[in-house]
Amino acid sequence: RKRERERERERDREREGEGREREGEREVMAHELERQRLQERLTILEAIERDAVHTAVEQVKEESQREKAREEQQRTEHEWAKERDRESARDKSMREIKFLSETIADLQTRSASLKDKLVDFGKREREIEDTCEAARELHKRV
């Protein structure tokens, strides 16, 4: 009986050991499953982070391109404004030149007309002087 009890105890210890061994294996498997689950979550979070970084980089690039486009548009508008100002100044100068040319032509016409009148005045003056001279001569005779 003693031996049987010993064997019984021995079997119980073996069963306990096997049970502990199985429990240890279950814990190892549970830890391994938890590790795999955490690794999957880490992989997902890393993918989300990469996507967020990529999105942020793309947004920065797009904003940079929009800023460059705005600067180019402002430069272009500035160039157009300068060109319009140059054209406006050129048009104003052309109008002034035309006005001055017309004024000069008008003054030349008036000058020629005044010269003609002066010549006519000179002729009349001589005629008047001749008439006066003739009247004096006539007056002396009378």
Image (cartoon, rainbow, N blue to C red):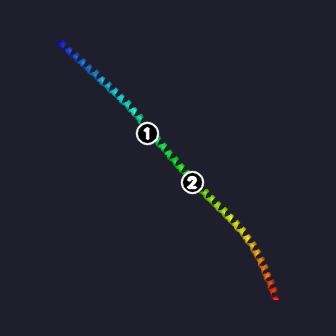
* Most foreground residue, 118 or 142: 142
Q: Residue at x 22, y 18 (%)?
A: 13
Amino acid type, residue under disc 1 in the picture: Val
Q: Which is closer to the viewer, label 2 or label 1?
A: 2
- Cα distance between the residues tagged 2 and 1: 41 Å
Q: Residue furthest left?
A: 2
Label disc, if present, on residue 81 of the rendered structure: 2
Q: Residue at x 66, y 63 (%)?
A: 99
Q: Earlier in the sequence, mark 2 or mark 1?
A: 1
Q: Residue furthest right?
A: 141
Instruction: Give residue 112's position: percent from left, percent from top.
Output: 74, 70
Label disc, if present, on residue 53 of the rendered structure: 1
Q: Residue at x 49, y 45 (%)?
A: 64
Q: Residue furthest front?
A: 142
The answer to which image quadrant residue 53 occupies is: top left
The answer to which image quadrant residue 16 occupies is: top left
The answer to which image quadrant residue 96 occupies is: bottom right
Q: Residue furthest top?
A: 1
Amino acid type, residue under disc 2 in the picture: Ala
Residue 52 lies, with reference to residue 73, above or below; the image says above
Instruction: Give residue 97's position: percent from left, percent from top.
Output: 66, 62
Horizontal relation, residue 85 to residue 10: left or right:
right
Instruction: Give residue 137's position: percent from left, percent from top.
Output: 81, 86
Location of the N terminus by quadrant is: top left
Query: The residue tagged with tag 1: helix, strand or loop?
Result: helix
Instruction: Give residue 124's position: percent from left, percent from top.
Output: 77, 77
Q: Residue at x 18, y 13 (%)?
A: 5
Graded by Cα atoms within 10 Å as few (under 14), some (14 to 19) or many (20 or more), the crowding at tag 2 reads few
Horizontal relation, residue 91 to residue 46: left or right:
right
